[in-house]
Image (spheres, rainbow, N blue to C red):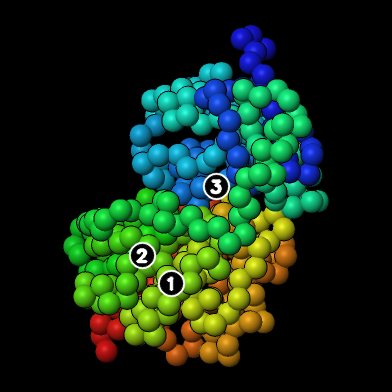
Amino acid sequence: MDNFKAAILALEDGRVWRGRSWGAVGESTGEMVFNTSMTGYQEVLTDPSYAGQIVCMTYPLIGNYGVNSEDGESSRPWVEGFVAREFSRMASNWRSEESLEDYLQRWSIVAIDHIDTRALVRHIRDKGAMRACLSTTDADANSVIQKARNSPPMENRELASVVTTKKAYEFPAVGEERFHVVCYDFGVKTNSLRELAQAGCRITVVPASTSATEVFALEPDGVYLSNGPGDPASMTKEVEEVKQVAQSGVPTFGICFGHQLLGRAFGGKTFKLVFGHRGGNQPVKDFRDGHVEITSHNHGFAVQADSLPPEVEVTHINLNDQCVEGMRHTTLPIISVQYHPEAAPGPHDAAHHFGRFIDLMEKRSAS
């Protein structure tokens, strides 16, 4: 390992890994989580749902195809830190515009490799996601452990206001405009907007704090509740606005964080998963016809099934742990899924859910 620069990763329970500093020089804290995707590390880095988290990739070699200006899910990376078994020194791909190392350094993202990521992931799976500190400037393990313990926990942490757009903006439809959709930006991924635009939707993206009254004034054909970071239980005010939107009869589609907010708007409860679902290989069963989708996930909280009222039907469950992955209202045009139908680079099994949303808007316009 030429030009070896030391880094240390410490968890709040005292576990420590020492390895090589790869990205920026510095120190960061966040919730330690892992992602099982084999590809798509740029999408992971730029997904706003990872705000407040240090991400470990389980695939052993990361960075070999570089980064480019097209694959980002937002305008900047949001992870607090990045962890891999080995970061590639070479970036070889016809679409590559920058090496991962240069990218991380440019955005001041601290990273570490040459650690046993299998041991780290097994530890998190056993003990649960927990606070961590990643440092290239402090070699004292006890000091770094204490910094992890002093960092804020994810429970009751509100992060949507950190990642949301500061002002509303338009995302045009591709081809003929069929519908106007208002998107609540709790940390929206760009590919969600692309998918809606491809389906003929003009999207008005609004800040997370936007009131239901302001949404109604835009006269949308549908409302899209995006993904995002943090604990949905911290979003009391936003849940009340979502409830007003949902009860109005406007077709509404929530994914991930938006799904959780809908669950709470219906009167349900949410809870923190032990280590969360993050990656592109989660099996989800659709109760409507029994088929199974392999899906992309990024969430640490879930809706509690037995807390939902009778008029809310659970439509999908995760086959790994049986948690709620999809809902629909039996009398209102409202659907939601916990996973990512816009998944980039994939898998694409769940892309049809955008079609379900389009169907709801078509039925309303025809009535």
For the residues labelled 2 and 1, the Cα–Cα distance comes to 8 Å
Does 71 sit above or below residue 241? above
Camera-side mark, 3 or 1:
1
Is 104 positioned to the left or the right of 271 in the image?
left
User: Dot 3: within a 10 Å radius of its alpha carbon, few (fewer than 14), some, or many (20 or more) residues?
Assistant: many
Q: Give the mark, 2 or 3, whose residue is nearer the N terminus.
A: 3
For the residues labelled 3 and 1, the Cα–Cα distance comes to 21 Å
State yes or no: discs 2 and 3 in contact (Cβ < 8 Å).
no
Q: Position of residue 192 (x, y in %)?
A: 39, 56
Of residue 300 and residue 323, the one placed in the foreground of this image is 300
Q: Amino acid at mark 2?
A: Ser
State yes or no: discs 2 and 1 in contact (Cβ < 8 Å).
yes
Of residue 15 and residue 141, the one placed in the foreground of this image is 141
Question: Dividing the picture into quarters, in which one does residue 338 lie?
Answer: bottom right
Q: Which mark is residue 343?
A: none
Does 354 sit above or below residue 145? below
Is 46 positioned to the left or the right of 150 in the image?
left
Q: Give the mark, 2 or 1, whose residue is nearer the N terminus.
A: 2
| Identity of the residue drawn at 42% across and 70% down | 238
Q: Amino acid at mark 1?
A: Lys
Question: Dividing the picture into quarters, in which one does residue 133 lie?
Answer: top right
Question: Dividing the picture into quarters, in which one does residue 301 lie?
Answer: bottom right
Of residue 194 and residue 309, the one placed in the foreground of this image is 309
- What residue is disc 2 on? 209
User: Dot 2: within a 10 Å radius of its alpha carbon, few (fewer than 14), some, or many (20 or more) residues?
Assistant: some
Residue 36 seen in the current view: no
- What residue is disc 1 on? 237
Is 178 positioned to the left or the right of 316 in the image?
left
State yes or no: discs 3 and 1 in contact (Cβ < 8 Å).
no
Q: Amino acid at mark 3?
A: Gly
* Secondary structure beneath label 2: loop
- What residue is disc 3 on? 52
